[in-house]
């Protein structure tokens, strides 16, 4: 049976065994031969290159030298014995050091003999040395798999302690590749392979580990990257096809009284063109008879709520109920109040359901939902509790999507026999490449235009040493009856330390802005939700003038009178987070300011982040820069998707390959959506294989 070799448990590999296999499973999630073969090197060393000792750079990279051992010395007591061998080439000398296996190595080292020495040099007390180098005598018999370009594999301390260092891993993989049974079945069609001039899969697997040349290595990498990205796209597009064609959706055929009434008589302003365009997208989805699954991206303040509201009214006009879910109670509250206000005068019943809704109110809401008298329900995750049942739920709006887990969202889909339409709103701008990879099965709309008359937030970088000026500016701001946020970083690894910083900061602020002339509030992640909400409400009601906070305030509460945001230790924040925070000010009519305070010394990356913030307000530009500086794994909302566990592709650097992969997948699904043509059976089979391993991920990413 083909493939059984690849599925063989890794403990059966010669030199592994059950005990060491446990380490491979625990540390690298490698269970089978196939998975071991898919553990790709992260770098390569060109072993045809010999460096002169005098030209060694102190940059932490592996190098290879060729030289004679002139002296061998062993020092230390029995158990801390070490061996030091001095090597020279024509240009200089360095020491080779072994801290372990001294006795064994000493017998092997021969003075006067020339070796090829491979390792990572470092400086110690003014002398260059290489610890635990690899030695070879030039002209040793050639190996069956070329090791001129040597692979380097990631390892961990645990792995290394079981002899699974880079070299150990490489040895195991070599055993597999040299096995008679080794075979990598092709998983792309001849059509794709010839159109994109890809190399054979088996050839790619051999050469990704043991490249015969730089050229074939490059082609192997390209082939495997393509394969990885292509199957992600194919999988997403298949899911979308099933959703759109196999599952029928509710049809909202018309817009009616509520939409017209609201639009013509209640809306206080003209919609932006972007808002109109998005609503048009949504209307055509809702009328299509297919379930809508749309991601709405729009920068903070771009007016997503209005789009949600209009969409909900369309649902109502078609005799369906709608609900809207927000990540925190205070946000749910704010949506409830805004939407109630905007819809006052219309015959629409709106209810709020959160963790603090009283039992008696719950009962009434529950009845109203079931008999259909409640039209719109707004709330927190309390909405997805099992006992919340609707009469006829037609639309689910989810605000600030990245705050919800996959499983939580999946539960909402089940609240009607036919899956309701879904509109997911996010203010986290997701760069196109990432969106393509993560949300390939969602339709995406973007609001790329701000409502008119909005003054951009003026952003300034201020060094710690000029703190006094910032305090003056805060006094001035409060003097003009505006309010101020002061934000401190709170980063997980050093939570207690950060909390201490925050409390110290709070004391300093208090001493600068004393009672009773000033009053100061504080929110942080260690507080209970109720306390946080109370503090935010006090700030909203202008009972406090300064809000000392951590990033808990980053998600969407609207306080138009807050016009200044000071971000302490701004160098410690990610770009997206800075952008999100800045979005909390500039919501009123007054000119808003964002002050980024940093220490006097900045790393290059930190400087780039700060400069980007000062230069631009464009969320997408900021997200692109962020992606480049941090890599995709750090983007908010991407960890939980399980999709970014890429083995070889890099969605930032491999944007071009991603486009090829995307286009190819689109063309194939368009031509043969069920993958039932004989030539596509190879794709169908591999997709089933992939789906098996991803079974737990729901319909939506
Ligand atoms: P976000 O996209 O961050 O959720 P909101 O929906 O809260 O943004 O809108 C921000 C503010 O802009 C609100 O006060 C809203 O009433 C206002 N707004 C939305 N659309 C327009 C528009 N077309 N013209 C003027 N103001 C608008
Ligand atoms: Mg919002």
Image: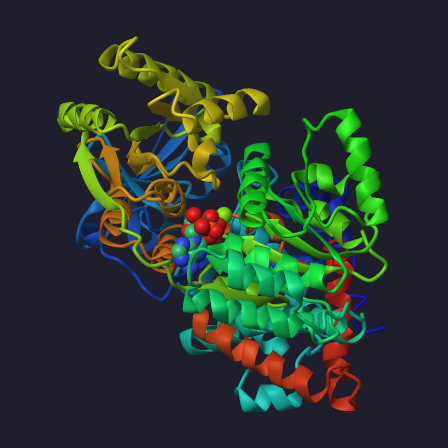
Image location of residue 424, percent across then percent down:
60, 56
Up-down relation of residue 187 to residue 383 (above or below) = below
Q: Is residue 375 visible?
A: yes
Quarter holding residue 520: top left
- Please indicate whether residue 422 sits to the left or right of residue 46 in the image: right
Image quarter hosting the N terminus: bottom right
The colour mode here is rainbow
- Inspect this view and state whether residue 174 appears: no
Place of residue 282 in the rendered image (x, y in percent of width and height, measured from the top left)? 60, 68
Give the camera-side residue of 647 and 553: 553
Q: Nearer the viewer, residue 395 or 541?
A: 541
Determine the residue positioned at 59% across, 44% down: 340
Residue 91 vs residue 138: left or right?
Answer: left
How many numbered badges does the structure rendering display? 0
Front one among 691 and 219: 691
In this rendered view, identify the residue nearer to me: 76 or 6. Answer: 6
Q: Position of residue 535 (x, y in %)?
A: 47, 22
Image quadrant holding the C terminus, namely bottom right
**In the figure, 658 relative to 535: above or below?**
below
Position in image of residue 681 (x %, y %): 77, 83
């Amino acid at each position: 049976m083909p493939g059984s070799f690849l599925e063989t448990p890794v403990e059966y590999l010669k030199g592994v065994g059950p005990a060491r296999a446990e380490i491979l499973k625990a540390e690298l999630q490698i269970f089978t031969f196939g998975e071991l073969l898919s553990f790709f090197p992260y770098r390569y060393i060109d072993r045809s290159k010999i460096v002169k000792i005098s030209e060694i750079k102190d940059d932490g990279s592996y190098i290879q030298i060729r030289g004679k051992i002139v002296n061998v010395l062993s020092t230390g007591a029995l158990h801390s014995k070490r061996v030091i061998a001095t090597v020279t080439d024509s240009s200089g000398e360095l020491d080779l050091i072994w801290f372990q296996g001294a006795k064994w190595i000493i017998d092997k080292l021969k003075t006067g003999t020339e070796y090829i020495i491979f390792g990572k040099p470092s400086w110690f007390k003014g002398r260059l040395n290489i610890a635990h180098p690899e030695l070879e005598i030039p002209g040793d018999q050639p190996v069956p798999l070329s090791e001129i370009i040597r692979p380097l594999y990631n390892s961990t301390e645990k792995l290394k302690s079981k002899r699974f260092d880079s070299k150990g891993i490489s040895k195991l993989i070599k055993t597999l590749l040299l096995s008679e049974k080794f075979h990598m079945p092709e998983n792309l069609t001849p059509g794709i392979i010839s159109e994109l001039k890809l190399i054979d899969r088996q050839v790619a697997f051999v050469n990704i580990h043991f490249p015969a040349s730089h050229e074939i290595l490059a082609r192997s990498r390209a082939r495997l990257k393509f394969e990885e990205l292509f199957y992600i796209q194919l999988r997403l597009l298949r899911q979308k096809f099933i959703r759109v064609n196999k599952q029928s959706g509710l049809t909202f055929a018309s817009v009616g009284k509520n939409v017209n009434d609201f639009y013509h008589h209640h809306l206080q302003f003209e919609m932006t063109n972007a808002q109109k365009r998005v609503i048009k997208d949504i209307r055509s989805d809702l009328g299509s008879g297919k379930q809508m699954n749309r991601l709405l991206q729009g920068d903070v303040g771009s007016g997503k709520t209005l789009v949600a509201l209009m969409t909900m009214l369309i649902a109502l006009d078609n005799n369906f109920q709608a609900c809207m879910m927000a990540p925190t109670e205070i946000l749910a509250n704010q949506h409830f109040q805004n939407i109630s206000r905007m819809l006052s005068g219309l015959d629409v019943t709106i209810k709020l359901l959160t963790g603090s809704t009283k039992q008696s109110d719950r009962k009434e809401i529950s009845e109203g939902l079931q008999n259909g008298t409640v039209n719109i329900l707004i709330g927190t995750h309390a909405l997805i509790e099992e006992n919340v049942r609707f009469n006829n739920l037609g639309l689910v709006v989810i605000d600030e999507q990245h705050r919800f887990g996959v499983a939580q969202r999946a539960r909402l889909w089940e609240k009607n026999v036919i899956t309701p339409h879904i509109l997911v709103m996010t203010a986290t701008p997701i760069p196109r490449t990432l969106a393509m990879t993560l949300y390939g099965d969602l339709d995406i709309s973007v609001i790329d235009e701000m409502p008119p008359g909005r003054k951009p937030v003026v952003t300034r970088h201020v060094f710690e040493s000029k703190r006094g000026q910032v305090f003056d500016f805060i006094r001035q701001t409060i003097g003009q009856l505006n309010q101020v946020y002061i934000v401190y970083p709170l980063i997980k690894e050093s939570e207690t330390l950060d909390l201490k910083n925050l409390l110290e900061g709070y004391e300093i602020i208090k001493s600068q802005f004393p009672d009773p002339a000033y009053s100061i509030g504080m929110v942080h992640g260690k507080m209970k939700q109720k306390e946080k909400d109370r503090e935010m409400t006090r700030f909203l009601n202008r009972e406090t003038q300064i809000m000392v906070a951590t990033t808990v305030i980053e998600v969407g509460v609207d306080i138009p009178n807050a016009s200044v945001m000071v971000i302490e230790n701004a160098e410690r924040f990610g770009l997206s987070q800075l952008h999100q925070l800045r979005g909390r000010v500039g919501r009123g009519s007054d000119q808003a300011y964002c002050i980024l305070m940093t220490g006097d010394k900045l790393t290059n990356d930190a400087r780039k982040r700060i400069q980007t913030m000062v230069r631009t307000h464009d969320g997408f530009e900021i997200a692109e820069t962020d992606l480049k500086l941090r890599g995709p794994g750090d983007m908010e909302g991407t960890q939980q998707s399980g999709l970014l566990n890429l083995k070889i592709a890099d969605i930032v650097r491999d944007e071009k390959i991603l486009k090829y992969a995307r286009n190819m997948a689109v063309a194939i699904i368009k031509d043969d959506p069920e993958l039932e043509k004989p030539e596509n059976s190879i794709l169908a089979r591999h997709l089933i294989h992939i789906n098996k391993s991803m079974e737990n991920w729901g319909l939506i990413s």
